[in-house]
Amino acid sequence: MDIADVRKAFIGNKFRYTKHGTEQRINRHITGEDIKQAILTGEIIENYPTDKYGPSYLVYGKTDMGRPLHVQIALLPIISIVTVYEPYPEQWIDNRIRRK
């Protein structure tokens, strides 16, 4: 699966939120539309093939208002949003590369 497949799933509303993903979205004041915009403009920046949620990706994208977001999605039978957050500059270089 690549970013084009992920985008296609979001356009077709063929995804779901995990309990944690829902909680994080609400707690961080991130709307469903924000997440969709980030996915549609985003790129896969990390791959977690052995994640506890199953194979997953970390996607970096921006909302229409330019808000940077990281969205972790699991590739279960249906794409699942595991978590979402604004990347902290002290932890990321250009929101794409994890600082050591």
Image: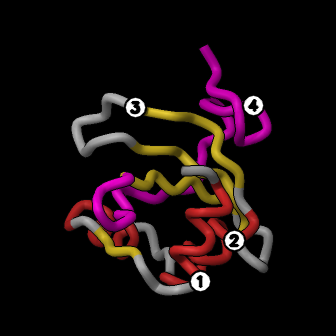
Mark nearer the N terminus (4 vs 1): 1
Q: Position of residue 44 (x, y in %)?
A: 64, 46
Vertical arrangement, residue 7 with respect to residue 51, above or below:
below
Q: Residue 10's quadrant in the figure?
A: bottom right
Measuring 24% from the left and 60% from the top, which residue is drawn there?
Answer: 20
Reading the image, the residue beneath label 2 is 40
Q: Position of residue 65 (x, y in %)?
A: 78, 78
Label 2 with label 1: CB-CB less than 8 Å: yes
**Crowdedness near tag 4: few (<14), some (14–19) or many (≥20) residues, C-alpha within 10 Å:** few
Three-letter code for the amino acid on which mark 3 is drawn: Pro
Three-letter code for the amino acid on which mark 2 is drawn: Leu
Reading the image, the residue beneath label 1 is 11
Reading the image, the residue beneath label 3 is 49
Say which element carries label 3.
Answer: loop
Mark nearer the N terminus (3 vs 4): 3
Q: Position of residue 47 (x, y in %)?
A: 51, 34
Vertical arrangement, residue 2 with respect to residue 66, above or below:
above
Range of residues picked out in magenta: 75-100
Measuring 47% from the left and 85% from the top, which residue is drawn there?
Answer: 13
